[in-house]
Image (tube, grey):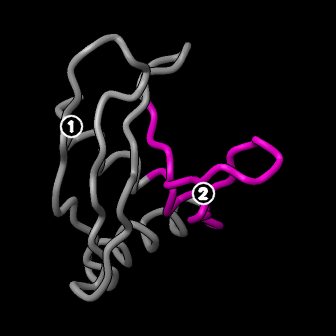
Amino acid sequence: MEQNRKEVKKMLKEDLKLEVSRIHKLDGSSSTKAFCDLAILDNFVIKGVRVVEGEKGLFVSMPREAGKDGKWYNTVTLLNKEVKNEIEKLVLEAYGA
């Protein structure tokens, strides 16, 4: 299990070339604290990644949109827990948490 985590971290740093390309911090009492863009492979960007203050502290939320039923749905879904954790760590570091 530990070897798999090391391989994923190496893959993220070397192969995916993840980078927070832009971050916009928000003032006020809203639970959304910042929006950022996440560049991947120097070729595409995920816009609208959010830093959110939840009951258990800060977390990263992927972009989402409202459906016709009034519910919110993610437009980007991370399928690998290790990748999700590394992206969250990268975004929160860029935010300054």
Q: What residue does disc 1 label?
A: 95
Residue drawn at the location 34% of the way across and 73% of the way down:
10
Is residue 73 positioned above or below 97 on the image? below
Q: Position of residue 47 (x, y in %)?
A: 35, 63
Residue at 51%, 20% (x, y): give it. Answer: 54
Quadrant that contains the C terminus: top left
Res 18 label? none
Residue 16: where, in percent of width, then height?
33, 80
Q: Look at discs 1 and 2 and give the one toward the viewer.
A: 1
Residue 49 part of the magenta-drawn span: no
Q: Nearer the viewer, residue 65 or 40?
A: 65
Which mark, by number, is residue 81?
2
Is residue 80 shown in magenta? yes
Residue located 39% across and 28% down the image: 32
Mark 1 vs 2: CB contact within 8 A: no
| Front-most of residues 94 and 67 | 67
Which SS class for mark 1?
Answer: helix
Task: Name the N-terminal-most of marks 1 and 2.
Answer: 2
**Please, is residue 42 above or below residue 47 in the view?**
below
The spot of residue 6 in percent (x, y) is 42, 66
Residue numbers of the magenta segment:
59-85
The quarter of the picture where residue 95 lies is: top left
Q: Amino acid at mark 2?
A: Lys
Q: Position of residue 29 (x, y in %)?
A: 34, 11
How many numbered circles are shown? Answer: 2
Residue 16 horizontal side relative to residue 17, left or right: right
What residue is shown at x 69% (from left), y 53% (from top)?
73
